[in-house]
Amino acid sequence: MFVELWTSRAFVEEARGWVEEQLRPLGTDLTGDWEQPHAREWSSAISFETTDGRVWFKVNGVGTAHEAGLVRELGRLVPGLVPEVLAVDAERAWTLSRDAGPTMRSVLSAEKSWEPWERLLARYAEAQLQLAEHAGVLLATGTPHLGPSQLVTQFHRLATTLGLLPVDEGGLSDEQRSALESRAPAYEAWCRELDATPFGDTVQHDDLHSNNVCWSGDAAGARFIDWGDATVSHPFLTLLATLNSVAFHAGVLGEDLSFGDDRVLRVRDAYLEPFTAFADRADLLRWSHIARRVGCVSRAMAYEAALSPQAQAADDFPVREWLLGLTEEWATAPLD
């Protein structure tokens, strides 16, 4: 439904008129050239060429509508973290931003991305620590609050909801339901442990990969984009999607989501470095392992929010697949 709307001539013209209106006070005019490279049911983006360079219009669907208000606050609270935000209509979930350059994946091979990832994640971690002081502001944008205690509730909700659905509609088999039930005590204990760590809930991107980083040549100038899956939660939950993606594109992600490659571990350690001011390395490593497991519920919820039931079926039911990640070997091995 949204894709049909957002790609319609009427919508593109409405978006163009709004962009033109926002640029007028800046003394910037549209040149007439535009492109819509992205239109999915969770969001669409249109680039417009102007007399002052390219700008991007983005519209979000209901499940990711918080992104508009969130990026405005991220840009205000941590200048340079996201592309320069020129205008936001939070009610319509519309954002206008300056172009921040090509994506990292389009200009850097996986082999050349190891050191940039180390520097990027250290910078991102520092921003998370800074933003923990403004969690209330972030939550006021409508960004979901999925801290460890909230995730326990959501784990049980998802398990119950999927347990009532037929398997061919994304539901759980009896065996899968039993396996999840057996993981509940461990999941609750992990969340309690994360809740007791010395870090406040903060923004965590939850889908940070090389297509969601604009790369202009160095980590300091990079900009993080596409915050539609973001939540306010324990910072380390970000490591699930990010490390999986880094390892996958480097060809070192095992089928069991393991990565014994030292380069991935260096990326992880670079991310953890800013947190060493608050805890020792052994604790940080343990909490990072726990957070990757706990994050399965956050990832499941991201797909639940973004995709219609029809789209979930077409994508082989990612909500179920992420939730069942808690029962797989990588999430059941001893932590110590």
Image (spheres, rainbow, N blue to C red):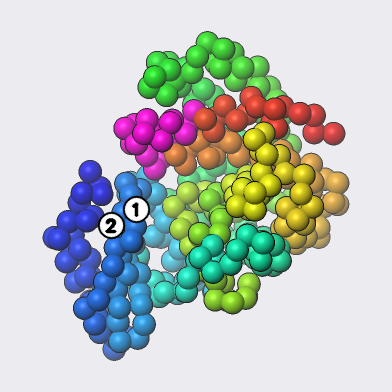
Relative horizontal placement of residue 138, taking residue 21 as reference (left or right): right
Relative vertical location of residue 141 with respect to residue 218 in this rendering, above or below: above
For the point 41% across and 35% down, which residue is it?
A: 315
Relative vertical location of residue 264 with respect to residue 307 in this rendering, above or below: below
Magenta segment boundaries in residue numbering = 304-320
For the point 25% across and 76% down, which residue is it?
A: 33
Q: Which residue matches tag 2?
A: 92
Is 198 in the magenta?
no
Q: Quadrant of residue 122?
A: bottom right
Q: How many marks?
A: 2
Q: Quadrant of residue 196?
A: top right
Q: Which residue matches tag 1?
A: 43
User: Looking at the picture, how far across and down is residue 31, in whole percent?
Assistant: 24, 82
Relative vertical location of residue 234 with respect to residue 176 in this rendering, above or below: below
User: Looking at the picture, how far across and down is residue 273, in whole percent?
Assistant: 78, 60
Callout 2 amino acid? Arg
Relative horizontal placement of residue 242, taking residue 43 as reference (left or right): right
Indicate the quadrant containing the C terminus: top left, top right, bottom left or bottom right: top right
